[in-house]
Image: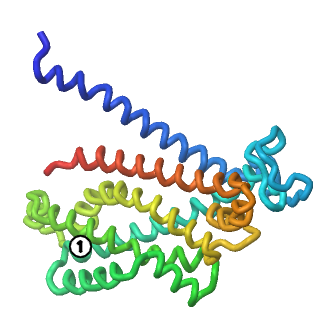
Amino acid sequence: MTTPTMAVKVLKAPRMRRGNLTFNLSVAVVAVMTFAAIFAPFVAPYDPDLVNLAVVYSGPTPAHWLGTDALGRDLLSRTIFGARTALLGPLLVVISSTIIGILLGLLAGWRGGWLDSVLARIFDLVFAFPSLLLAIMAVALFGKGLVAPVIAMSIAYAPFVARLTRSLVMAERSRPYVSAYRVQGFSGPWIALRRVLPNVTPIVGAQSTLNFGYVLAELAALSFLGLGVQAPTADWGAMINEAQAGIIGGHFLPAMVPAVAVVLVVVVVNVIGEELSDRIGGGVPA
């Protein structure tokens, strides 16, 4: 006889398998793209800047699997090399914003009082400026490239991480184990850094993974506007910008290939981030 509990397990099993399959596929896609980006000189079939006017706007062929652009450059090779800047920029932003946000959130949540109020107002001020606008302002001040936008977006995304960290730290601060450490004579900074911080970092890290896709799309938009990575360096956003003239003539492939790459990475990273958040968040006691 099938009990209600058994029925629930039977219904949930296929859903869990599909979720795990999607997660595993997403991890595989990210792993393949990361591997290709790191070993681009060995993986790419051509030099990404090699001009061949004899095969301008060539469609997919055995020699050029994804075709060529307006200068006859191999799209597959440029997409592989473009993954370097497309993935490195968001990675640097996520790492730096997470470190800054965790430290500020830990400080605000643990100390509270006037310090928490001051940091909250600073976060509100940063929230008033969209991250892409801050990146454009940084480019205007410090010049085009990848460094200025990465620094600006790190500052823009840090308050998101800080607010999450603050709320988690305030919840942890009221737990019995913190009181037990205080009774034993441990100092507040020691408890915060050695016990509270390790408890909140996995949750914050999983949530920060979701920022990777947003930053990637924004940096690609910045390169599309001509303010990010500059030619002749291969970059997905810059490739879409360069392909605008071809779209008018009916040559969509040079724009579609990098655009699909951007969309694919954003989707799979969001899948990974949501799955990690569910797994880590589900294991944290209330």
State the residue lying farthest toward the front: 249
Number of numbered markers = 1
Could you say which is closer to the camera, residue 251 or residue 62?
251
Among the 4 quarters of the image, the one containing residue 52: bottom right
Among the 4 quarters of the image, the one containing residue 101: bottom left
Looking at the rendered image, the quarter that the N terminus falls into is top left
Q: Amino acid at mark 1?
A: Pro
Q: Is residue 82 left or right of residue 46?
A: left
At 32% across and 26% down in the image, what residue appears? 14
Q: Is residue 75 left or right of residue 134?
A: right
State the residue lying farthest toward the right: 54
Q: Is residue 229 left or right of residue 72?
A: left
Residue 43 placement (x, y as % from top left): 74, 46
State the residue lying farthest toward the bottom: 141
Among the 4 quarters of the image, the one containing residue 162: bottom left
Disc 1 marks which residue?
A: 189
Residue 159 placement (x, y as % from top left): 33, 74
Dot 1 crowding, Cα within 10 Å, few <14, some 14–19, many 20+: few
Residue 41 placement (x, y as % from top left): 76, 53
At 69% across and 60% down in the image, what residue appears? 247
